Image: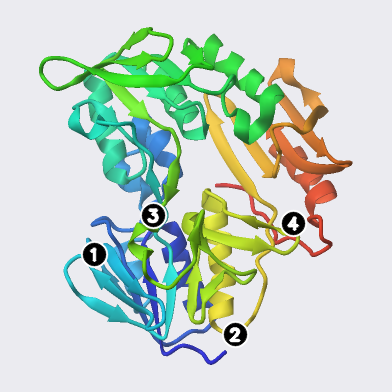
């Protein structure tokens, strides 16, 4: 592949920024344009539901790079410029202001859009948590209200519940699953996490669907109604029921869209067009399946591969999946793909002591490793069991989260 004369990156968050930096680091000297729907400088998302929400950090501390560091990339950054139309064949992107930006290569890094409940945008006091502005608005609302209902029992919902309890807020969490994070870490580990939240004072309503939001006469949310008929009173509600890839602007672009932008093993969606981060669905050669990962580590590591392939490397992306979450004093590191139905056993440590490593097995092989306040031991077991994914090809090195 000939090195592109100009690369256009659509999305200015961690994945887009990491791609720009990797291109420069790997010797690319051509023109570089980054389109960002947000007005803020690139920032880190994981602290939004933890340090920023609790007030331990000023929101500005999430900024990934200073203005001076961004300037050193010699790139054109277009802020508050969401992409609305794409022509993949021409590698052209039209922004909401009508500007058309063309490149020799295009990288899609537009991330996710939170799922919402019907009519939630019509009510004050109902939040999602995805962006810098979301976190600031939610913290402000929690400072004025004492009763929070979190809708959603996944990673984000559990983190928000833990953070709010640390702020002294009364928290009720409702979710359709039977345990917290059950789809991510299975019933056994999810059960331990559920017990931890109960011990810390979270009022759980699990295994029940949310039917509707209840409103006061002033147009502000006052509760969440469950399918059981119960009304959970609330001053503030956070909806954390997952997210979908932000790819609606790519309809009619010529790209294949499924669960994200469908790419080959090299993260290539079409000639000269690549996708990276939360919006990218690619074929993992080591695992022999299509994969899409929603986490910070993947955004950074996939960007290195995309940059290399833009410059002619033809390198398949074969990472060992990894994510982490901090809730109360529990720090969980999850390596691999621990299916909810996998057999789970404790390999080291003791859950009663709050420090252990669990191993997940399925169809005769290890599919995942979870460390609970034992990061070093979890990494060692990951290296032992997951260094080479099924399929025989080495996995990319997985770094620890910061």
Dot 2: what SS? Answer: loop
Whole-angstrom CA distance, mark 4 to mark 3, is: 25 Å
Image: 213 above or below 304: above
Q: Which mark is residue 312?
A: 2
Image: 327 above or below 77: above
Kindly identify which residue carries mark 4. 287
| Mark positioned earlier in the residue sequence (1 or 2) | 1
Locate residue 229 relative to residue 354 in the image: left or right.
left
Whole-angstrom CA distance, mark 1 to mark 2, is: 29 Å
Whole-angstrom CA distance, mark 1 to mark 3, is: 15 Å
Label 2 near label 1: C-beta < 8 Å? no
Residue 169 visible somewhere in the drawing? no
The quadrant of the image that shows the N terminus is: bottom right
| Mark positioned earlier in the residue sequence (1 or 4) | 1
Q: Specify few, some or many for label 1: CA neighbours under 10 Å numbering under 14, 14-19, or 20 or more.
A: many
Dot 1: what SS? Answer: loop
Q: Looking at this view, name the residue that lies furthest to the bottom.
A: 2
| Mark positioned earlier in the residue sequence (4 or 3) | 3
Q: Which mark is residue 81?
A: 1
Kindly identify which residue carries mark 3. 246
Dot 3: what SS? Answer: loop
| Mark positioned earlier in the residue sequence (1 or 3) | 1
User: Which numbered mark, 2 or 4, is in the foreground of this view?
Assistant: 4
Whole-angstrom CA distance, mark 1 to mark 4, is: 37 Å
Q: Looking at this view, name the residue that lies furthest to the right.
A: 364
Label 3 near label 1: C-beta < 8 Å? no
Q: Position of residue 136 (x, y in %)?
A: 27, 37
Residue 356, picture quadrant: top right
Q: Position of residue 167 (x, y in %)?
A: 37, 20
Q: Looking at this view, name the residue that lies furthest to the left.
A: 218
Whole-angstrom CA distance, mark 2 to mark 4, is: 24 Å
Q: Specify few, some or many for label 4: CA neighbours under 10 Å numbering under 14, 14-19, or 20 or more.
A: some
């Amino acid at each position: 592949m000939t090195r592109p004369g100009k690369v256009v990156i659509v999305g200015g968050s961690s994945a887009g920024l990491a791609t720009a930096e990797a291109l420069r680091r790997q010797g690319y000297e051509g023109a570089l344009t980054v389109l960002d729907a947000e007005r803020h400088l690139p920032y880190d998302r994981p602290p939004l539901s933890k340090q920023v929400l609790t007030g331990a950090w000023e929101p500005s501390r999430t900024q990934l790079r200073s203005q001076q560091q961004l300037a050193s990339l010699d790139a054109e950054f277009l802020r508050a410029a969401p992409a609305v139309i794409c022509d993949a064949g021409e590698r052209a992107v039209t922004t909401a202001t009508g500007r058309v930006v063309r490149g020799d290569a295009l990288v899609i890094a537009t991330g996710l859009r939170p799922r919402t409940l019907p009519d939630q945008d019509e009510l004050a006091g109902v939040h999602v948590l995805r962006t810098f502005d979301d976190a600031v608005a939610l913290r402000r609302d929690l400072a004025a209200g004492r009763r929070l209902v979190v809708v959603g029992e996944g990673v984000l919902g559990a983190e928000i519940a833990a953070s709010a309890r640390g702020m002294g807020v009364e928290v009720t969490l409702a979710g359709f699953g039977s345990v917290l994070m059950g789809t991510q870490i299975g019933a056994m580990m999810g059960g331990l996490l559920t017990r931890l939240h109960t011990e810390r004072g979270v009022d759980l309503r699990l295994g029940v669907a949310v039917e509707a939001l209840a409103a006061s006469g002033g147009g502000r949310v006052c509760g969440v109604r469950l399918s059981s008929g119960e009304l959970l009173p609330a001053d503030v509600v956070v909806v954390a029921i997952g997210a979908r890839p932000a790819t609606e602007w790519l309809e009619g672009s010529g790209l294949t869209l499924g669960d994200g932008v469908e790419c080959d093993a090299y993260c290539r969606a079409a000639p000269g067009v690549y996708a990276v981060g939360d919006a990218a669905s690619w074929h993992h050669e080591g695992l022999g399946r299509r994969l899409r990962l929603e986490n910070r580590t993947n955004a950074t590591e996939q960007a290195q591969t995309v940059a290399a392939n833009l410059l002619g490397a033809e390198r398949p992306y074969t990472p060992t999946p990894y994510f982490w979450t901090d809730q109360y004093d529990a720090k969980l590191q999850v390596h691999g793909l621990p299916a909810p139905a996998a057999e789970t056993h404790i390999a080291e440590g003791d859950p009663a002591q709050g420090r252990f490593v669990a191993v997940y097995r399925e169809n005769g092989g290890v599919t995942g490793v979870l460390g609970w306040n034992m990061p070093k031991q979890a990494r060692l077991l990951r290296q032992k069991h997951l260094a080479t994914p099924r399929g025989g090809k080495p996995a990319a090195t997985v770094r620890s989260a910061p």
